Amino acid sequence: MRMDVSDESLARAAADGDRQAFALLVERVYDRVYGYAVKLSGSRTEAEDLAQDLCAALPTKLQSFRGEAKLTTWLYRITVNAARDRFRRAATRARAADGWGDWELARQAEMAETAERVDWLMQAMSGLAVDLRETLALVLDGVTHKEAAQILEVSEGTVSWRVSEAKKKLKAMQEAEA
Amino acid sequence: MSDDLDDLKRAFDAALPRADPDKRAEAIALAMKNFDRVQESDALARQTSEPTREGGVFRGARQMLANISNRGFLTATTAIAAVAMVALIPVLRDSQPPEPDIFIPGEGARTVLESAPVADPAPVVEEVPEAADVLTRDAPVVSTSRKFDPSVRQSGPVNQGRPMADPSPQPPAPPAGAARNRTVAPASPGAGGGISLETGVLNLKHSAPAPLPDPVIVQPEPNTEAFPEADDNPIKVTAESPVSTFSIDVDTASWAFIRNALNRGQLPPKDAVRIEEMVNYFSYDYPAPEGDAPFATHVGVSNSPWVEGTQIVHIGLQGILPEARPPMNLVFLVDTSGSMNSADKLPLLKQSFRLMLGQLGENDTIAIVTYAGSAGLALEPTKATERETILAALDTLHAGGSTAGQAGLQQAYATAAQMARDGDEDAISRVILATDGDFNVGISDPDDLKDFIADKRDEGTYLSVLGFGRGNLDDATMQALAQTGNGIASYIDTLAEAQKVLVDQLTGALVPIADDVKIQVEWNPALVAEYRLIGYETRALKREDFNNDKVDAGEIGAGHQVTALYAITPVGSPARMTDPLRYAAGDAAPVADDTGELGFLRLRYKAPGEDTSKLIETPIMADAAPLAEADWALAIAGFGQILRGSDLIGDWSMGDAIALAQGARGEDAFGYRQGAITLMRLAQSLQQ
């Protein structure tokens, strides 16, 4: 029954020491962070690591959540920041786009059926600049433009511009393919 | 159009790999464990001290830890990490409440990123320019482990079980030079007994009384640094796009930034590495221009050290160094916001300024405008020879308040205009913005700001930017402002760098000799199969921009040198990365070449203050000799490409870069090149 409770009330309860509330919250958090990170990086292990890190730090981080923003907004913001930091650092080890390469190998074994689409997807995402990819990953997660603007700390206009730019690029890639 | 997105969304949902359920369960279990620990310790803490007060200090300390770890300290050696931890001890001594034991996986600690600002007692530890020295000194007798030994933190004058001491902000640590060998009273294990303070983020075991190193290299502020993002220039196929166009860049900020990062034990973020700025940081033995031309153009060809079978085309510009420099009107726009209050910011700025003063003469005029909270004229336009007045004004500058730059910027330009009216009409007017980053000028739209600066540039006032300190240095904005203002962006992290930028290169930095310098190379497909411009990613221009005088580009100052490097693959070389097209017309039978030209170099520039550009044309001959000191430029460019993680230099390693650099060091009168080799070695260790 608690499944319907909003993130915010879960967060408040968890901050007050409600263990059950925290357990529910952390599951939601894990899925959301994983979902975002896997879109951004294309790498399952990267996304899993990031989700684990954020969940491990969540008890501490919750204390700094003051409830002025929506929890999802706040959460996405720390996710975006952590992902940026991780992928920027990772650049010295491997280029961020390489995640899509690793995954390509795994994919071939796994799903021959969706191959075409995935191929296109892979190319499409890795062909986008990081800011477009970030924005698109959020919007694809169902975040509104307004919220995405708060998360990325840019104006709403910028988000809309980026989304349309990303679409334009994707379309161009699609056409180039066809 | 939204159909596309739905498509994409469906594709993602269907095709993206799901998380491993075991990993998920593991992560959640870990989170629960941490949750329990936080709860336990909270309960404990509330019995002994005021919850509110405790929260602040406590959280501050923890955020500092999180901040430190996320800055990649863990990528450095454990000794460096230990130094960083020891440096924190002074704060922790005062914070009594138990710290929960949070387990964060090794990798994770780095990525945990707090966006909230740190609590007040943050500026405990100064970032010092000599960080490298400290790092390379003997490692302290400490070893890192998962547990934080309580005795270390109990070495301070605190009583267990009492409400905690008032968390008054710690005074900033003295600069390293002042207190190099200071030791902290040794901790006696078990002294005070009682509550165990555990942090778990990065722990330190302190076995024997050991001298503690000076607190260094910790930046407690949240990191809001921003760098312009640009991917490496790709390999271009000559047959498909034979023309390469870019604007010159004489900035050197990137080099100083890289040095600063490496000296603190971190590899610089990729976007902070701009290869052209690294190469241009050094001076080369290019012949001076002859006749009236403001600069001489040199072209050389050599074999690539990186990939067998490829060559390097080396373009070197040498600006003229006039014998007498024109008088200058300089308006210093100094950021005195609160964040400038650390040794490597306002105090370093004042010292740098004193150095520069010695280089100015009676025809030069200086004014100082400050901005922070409110803008103000700290020094009326004053002859540079009136040292006492200027130094007195300089001493009154204090950091405090928040940044409100727009009024400051407007006042600075107004002052420059007034100086231009009152003074020598040949004088060059320049606003020099000195800031630690976040240039929040109140003009909400960055484009408005650029337009404003561009207007002023067209009216004859240039803008240069000096960056100080780390933490929220907005490198991207600095670059953009300086590029728009036809000035240079420099990053000053040490007094030695101030010496280089403001003393040795003063004339070049402040006297422009050519504006809007653009380079265009047309490659000859008969001889060159592929080419790649190394660096200049943020300076790319469109082909048509070259002849369009309305399009802004970089300026060259007096005596400046600009070096650009292309890696080219000759036709027929086995190193060619792309295959010739099978169906493309004309490509099947390559045209025979009788020119002996690899390509044709075109340069456009405007004399300062003019609207029409002039054109210089030079063929790039295949048999051109290598330029002077080409190997040094290649060593540095290779170093940059390694730092950027380039995959286009084969298995060329840092070791190769060091070897090449050592062979090419040459005279190196000021030791800049030796310093570069030291940095390469540091980077080599950090990579491992």
Image (tube, grey):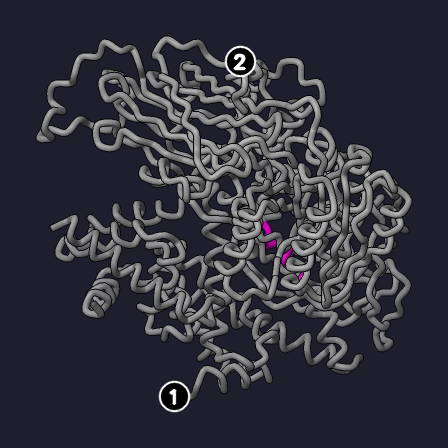
Would you say B596 lies left or right of B294 here? left
Q: Secondary structure at mark 2?
A: loop
Q: Establish if B511 lies above or below B174.
A: above
Label 2 neighbourhood size at 10 Å, few (<14), some (14-19), many (20+)?
some
Q: Is residue B652 above or below residue B56?
A: above
Looking at the picture, which amino acid does disc 1 mark? Asp
Q: Quadrant of the C terminus of chain B?
A: top right
- Tell which of B26 and A69 is nearer to you: A69
Residue at mark 2 to residue at mark 1: CA–CA distance: 72 Å
Three-letter amino acid code at the position of disc 2: Ala
Give B340 or B461, whichever is nearer the viewer: B461
Q: Is residue B482 left or right of residue A39?
A: right
Q: Position of residue B152 (x, y in %)?
A: 80, 56
**Total marks in image:** 2
Q: Could you say which quadrant of the image residue A111 lies in?
A: bottom left
Outermost residue to the bottom: A1
Mark 1 residue crowding within 10 angstroms, few (<14) / some (14–19) / many (20+): few
Q: Which residue is mark 2?
A: B628
Q: Residue at x 60, y 40 (%)?
A: B253
Closest to the observer, B97 or A114: A114
- What segment carries the magenta color? B63-71
Let me know if residue B494 is in the magenta part. Answer: no
Q: Are marks 2 and 1 on the same chain?
A: no
Q: Which mark is residue B589?
A: none
Name the residue: 21% across, 12% down: B593
Q: Chain of mark 2?
A: B
Instruction: Pinpoint residue A156: horizontal percent, then vertical percent.
Output: 41, 71
Q: Which residue is mark 1?
A: A4
**In-front residue for pair B194/B357:** B357
